[in-house]
Amino acid sequence: MDETRERVRINAKQTAKGAWQFDATFEDEAASVDIDAAASKLLEAVNAVEKKFKGDGKEIAGAE
């Protein structure tokens, strides 16, 4: 059985004005990657992080 070796990495950092911004990376060791599936997983992870930060009262950089 082939094991999928993929992960999403998200780094959060605070700007000088106090807002939070995220750098997100999707990594996969497969020979070929389904770009649509990778984009969906990346977006799902970023949305989850944004929701958590907003729920804690944190300002997200670029949010209006």
Image (spheres, grey):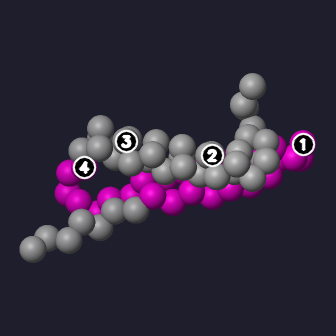
Q: Which amino acid does label 1 sit on?
A: Lys
In the rendered image, residue 12 lying in the magenta stretch gets the answer yes
**Residue position marked by numbered label 4 in the rendering:** 33
The amino acid sitting under disc 4 is Val
Q: Earlier in the sequence, mark 4 or mark 3?
A: 4
Q: Nearer the viewer, residue 48 or 20?
A: 48
Q: Is 13 situated left or right of 49 in this image?
A: right
The earlier-in-sequence mark between 2 and 1 is 1
Structural distance between the alpha carbons of marks 4 and 1: 38 Å
Give the magenta-colored segment's residue range. Answer: 8-33
Residue on which disc 1 sits: 17
Tell me the residue that label 3 is attached to: 40
Q: What element carries label 4?
A: loop
Mark 4 near mark 3, Cβ–Cβ under 8 Å? no
Residue kind at label 3, given as amino acid type: Ser
State the image coordinates of residue 16 (x, y, percent, origin top left).
89, 47
